[in-house]
Amino acid sequence: MTVALCPASTNDLAFSGTARLLPAVPASGHRQSPASTWQQHNARLGPVPLQVAPQLVDLVSAAGLLGRGGGGFPTGTKLAAVAANSSRRNPAVVVANCCEGDPTSSKDAVLLATSPHLVIDGALLAAATTGADRVILAVHKGSRTSADLSQALAARGPQSIEITVVGIPARFVASEATALVRYLNTGDARPAGRLSRIWESGVDGRPTLVDNAETLAQLALIARFGPAWFRQLGTESEPGTALVTVGGAVSRPGVVEVAVGTPLRIILTAAGWVPTGHAGPAWALIGGLAGRWIDLHRATEIGFSADELGLVGGTKGVSSIVVLPAGGCVLTETARILDYLAHSGARQCGPCMFGLPAIAADMASLADADRDALGRLRVRLPVIDKRGGCSHPDGAVALAASALRALTGPDAVHLDLHLRHGGCNSPAAIVPLGGHRTAGNRRENR
Amino acid sequence: MSPKANLLLRVDPLSCRAHGLCAEELPEAIRLDEWGYPMLPTGPLPVHLVRRAKAAANACPVLALRLASVGER
């Protein structure tokens, strides 16, 4: 499929179907050279429309763009806050968050490999809008994405504004916005806390905008085609397309771009999911490691949006779906994930230092037939919730609570198996955890 | 019901080191979790506790606890 596009048209549906961020790549499957990626970007979209900058806050607000890093905060509001604090004497800094900390998600890596210039355009537009004199593309140190972005920048040639690729430690919480800013300032990649007002004083004390890579790419399209075009896809409250990573028990795992609100069935079918015909629940972890367990048998017609997923107790989170195979075990998967989250915290606050290891150990004990662990979890989860220095503990609590709802509801038979026999015959570990922690590698403290 | 002040307790979780002195100063409003970190009431403080809430904030060796106006971050 060749995508034709006229940069001058502001009202046409610029791309066929939903391929806005990820245009069809030539069938060869080979990676394009950095030079040809840049040429194609220019041919499709033309130069970055920096002249739109004075209206961009209004355009982005009218488009209803919500942040795509997981928080879902209105991008126009964030842009306006940074712009209001930026001045000639104290110009803003724009940070494109290209780190993608959640191991279940690869949407930003795919976006940055396929359409790096859309993200760079978005960052340049955000800089022009906020009066920034500096753009930082934050990537995981040594990652493929880091190389992709450096090559893309080189292909663009000299820029009118300072724009650099900065490597961030590949750590789960390091890509949280305040942790990014703190790392850039001090070399310490731990979250700086909920009281940190980075839109007033962030990198080098400057007003700082931190936006996710996909958010900036969407912004670069809104600047070209306008809010009405953007709203042609998606829902009223969550317009546009979204990149979704689908993995686990599917035959074609990968990243798809869909209109927000597209039924799960369509997204899963595109990834090669086949309903098993298995009588019990068909679990998928939706939203990332801080996501929720959703029974696909009851949810195939649910639209992939924060609103609709919220109605069934879910969350859009980092827009990933990991499907468990038939007979997959929510309990052992959750115990693995909690163990990973407990080890990847910044350990600055009580909930992170003590709360997460405790609930990870409880979940592991429950899988090992310790009935009392259920009671301990019911006491500890609400104690930890909302009391951490950042939202990392809250995500772990939400995941654990979701697992308990599954295991005491539709999956009660499965929990009984663990409590009677100390385990189950579930298939091997499914949810990806960034490599360094493996199944069965549990903490011993109770 | 006792009248409420326009003040509430806030703790900075990154600074708090679980010394627990706040809970000794104000056991009516501050409990400690099993690891010794304070669990604070979410709403405004009753007027009659404000003076001792200030004492609790002042007792914190790392100044992690403070009194904030309702609506303040």
Image: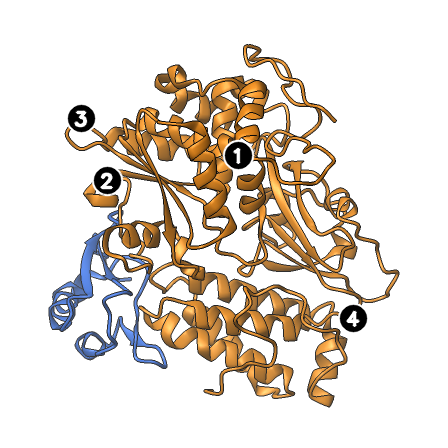
Tell me the crowding category of disc 2: few under 14, some 14 to 19, or many 20 or more residues within 10 angstroms, Cα based.
some
Residue at mark 2: A200
Q: What element does badge 3 sit on?
A: loop
Query: What number is the disc on residue A34?
Result: 1
Q: In orange, which chain?
A: A
Q: In blue, which chain?
A: B
Q: Quadrant location of residue A113? A: top right
Q: What element does badge 4 sit on?
A: loop
First of labels 3, 4 by sequence position: 3
First of labels 4, 1 by sequence position: 1
First of labels 3, 2 by sequence position: 3
Query: What number is the disc on residue A88?
Result: 3
Front residue of A174 and A159 = A159
Residue A102's spot in the image, x, y percent? 52, 57
Residue at mark 4: A327
Query: Which amino acid, mark 3?
Result: Arg
* Residue at screen point 58% across, 50% down: A106
Front residue of A357 and A214 = A214
Q: Is residue A181 left or right of residue A65?
A: left
Which of the two marks, 4 or 1, is nearer to us in this view? 1
Outermost top residue:
A8
